[in-house]
Image (tube, helix red, strand yellow):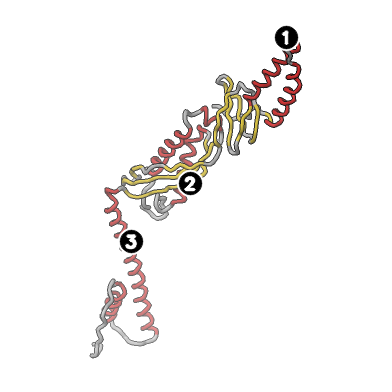
Amino acid sequence: MIREKVGFSLNGYAVVATLVVVLAIFVPQISELMNATTIISLAVVALDVAALAGFMMVQPNQAKVMTLFGAYVGTVKETGLRWTIPLFNRRTVSLRIRNFESGKIKVNDNQGNPIEIATIVVWSVSDSAEAVFEVDDYESFVNIQSESALRNMASSYPYDPQEEDAVALRSHPQTISDILKQEIQDRLDKAGVMVHEARISHLAYAPEIASAMLQRQQASAIVAARTRIVEGAVGMVEMALEKLREKDVVELDEERKAVMVSNLLVVLCGDKHTQPVINAGSLY
């Protein structure tokens, strides 16, 4: 596996000054007469001109991956005007943070329900040598592996929690994001890529079952609400009977208590307003 290492480079401005000085010294020595001094001066000037090919500009958050006859010789990350050996072949690699949004993919969750899911992945190149030499196209590699990791993660968890505190795609977004980030990072380590963040951007049931699942969610919500209402109503009836007994307001036999409990539950648990009926006669 090829790891990133520091490549040879010099400050470009210092090299420019050196080349100017060399030209100033040797150009005047070139004459029409071909002698040893002229030949040396011509050779030095020719090398000086050839050295111009070694200049390169490195932008912030950018790297130059250099090779010599197919062999990796190093990476230059120092910004500004730099100079290196002209024979080095240089390839620019961006180290800036990028984001990638996957398309909506259809996958079955671990309950077998078809869902649609998409993700946004924030990433950057952390090792320029691995990104260039370990994979053919690291950008395409990030896209494909991110979607593969998303598909694998989505099929491992249910859309809705089946048990209390169970991890699900919809109910635990932060936990799912952390799991997805680690899943993608494990796949991209070999490409010299660091994943900064991975979050689900779209999550929904597939259209063919969306209506049925919505009805199931509504039914579950209604059952939960009714359960809460009944629990509260029972508590209020218990409190009412206890207060009547403590304050000795009225003595009720078991039959009348049952009637009172029934009436209170109807009033408290009903989804519509009730109309009271006043008993003008005796209690019995």
> Helix, strand or loop at disc 1?
loop
Q: Which mark is residue 221?
A: 3
> Helix, strand or loop at disc 2?
helix
Residue 39 falls in which quadrant of the image? top right
Q: Provide residue 171's location: percent of width, then percent of height.
A: 41, 53
- Callout 3 environment at 10 Å: few (<14), some (14 to 19), or many (20+)? few
From the image, which quarter does the C terminus lie in?
bottom left
Q: Is residue 181 left or right of residue 261?
A: right
- Callout 1 environment at 10 Å: few (<14), some (14 to 19), or many (20+)? few
Q: CA distance from mark 1 to mark 2?
A: 74 Å
Residue, disc 2: 178
Residue occupying image coordinates x 47% and y 51% = 174
Label 1 amino acid? Met
Label 2 amino acid? Asp
Label 3 amino acid? Ala
Residue, disc 1: 34
- Callout 2 environment at 10 Å: few (<14), some (14 to 19), or many (20+)? few
Q: Provide residue 59's location: percent of width, then percent of height.
A: 60, 36
Residue occupying image coordinates x 62% and y 24% = 53
